[in-house]
Image: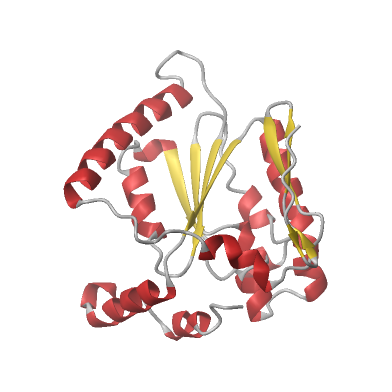
Amino acid sequence: RIVLKRDMGKLQFLTLRDRDGDLQLVCDRTLLDEDAFALLDEVDLTLALSRKDEAKQLAEQQERLLRLRLALGGQIGGEIGPPLCVVFEGWDAAGKGGAIRRLTNAIDARDYRVIPIAKPTDEEKAHHYLWRFWRHVPRAGLVTIYDRSWYGRVLVERLEGFARRDEWQRAYQEINDFEQQLCEHGTIVIKFWLHISKEEQLRRFRERETLAYKQHKINDEDWRNRRKWSN
């Protein structure tokens, strides 16, 4: 049994328990405060790889990823493995799309799907917000990559007022339950948060406005979201 507890005033943030080998995240409270961002403030953003080291490590990891995918699909070992969900979240312009491209370059296009999460459609609005994610959970041996995720309920939807207070507060437990159900079914869930500084985001935003082939990536909504960085 492992218990990690962080007292952040109104938020008892993390309780992590080892249950039959599976780690579960439990939020004891559903009211966030600004201290919840302290962990991101401590990230060392000066760390970097040289171009040479980046290319070498990328090639090695893509080869490793290919072997893992073949094992998952039963092409190696003969037994089909569990479903795999890979989740990317992070700041605007943090590099989610680039990371996903590097990931998928190593995999046969028939073995994965990338699900970009944007403004919900009318059909998606007519269902519970988790439905748009449930419907893309892969079958055994295959991979679904989510470009943004169900955490949007307590991030952008909370900040923009798209979800009522009772809805986004309830979502913390709903998300925990959703992920627990996936794991208890045998689905592997891997989550990545891509973090950059506010200054680096500004540099990337300006680059997107300047370079013609990147201008489709920037709009007024991105700048409005940036003004809410501290929220």
Q: Quadrant of residue 203?
A: bottom left
Q: Residue at x 24, y 46 (%)?
A: 54
Q: Position of residue 74 (x, y in %)?
A: 46, 20
Q: Residue at x 38, y 61 (%)?
A: 95
Vertical position of residue 8 compared to residue 136: above or below? below
Q: Is residue 85 left or right of residue 58?
A: right
Q: Nearer the viewer, residue 170 or 38?
A: 38
Q: Is residue 38 left or right of residue 89?
A: right
Q: Position of residue 154 (x, y in %)?
A: 67, 66
Answer whether residue 89 is visible to the viewer in this image: yes
Farthest residue, direction left: 52
Q: Nearer the viewer, residue 102 or 142?
A: 102
Q: Is residue 14 left or right of residue 89?
A: right
Vertical position of residue 99 compared to residue 94: above or below? above
Q: Position of residue 140 (x, y in %)?
A: 56, 29
Q: Position of residue 214 (x, y in %)?
A: 28, 73
Q: How many marks?
A: 0
Vertical position of residue 190 compared to residue 99: above or below? above
Q: Residue at x 46, y 62 (%)?
A: 195
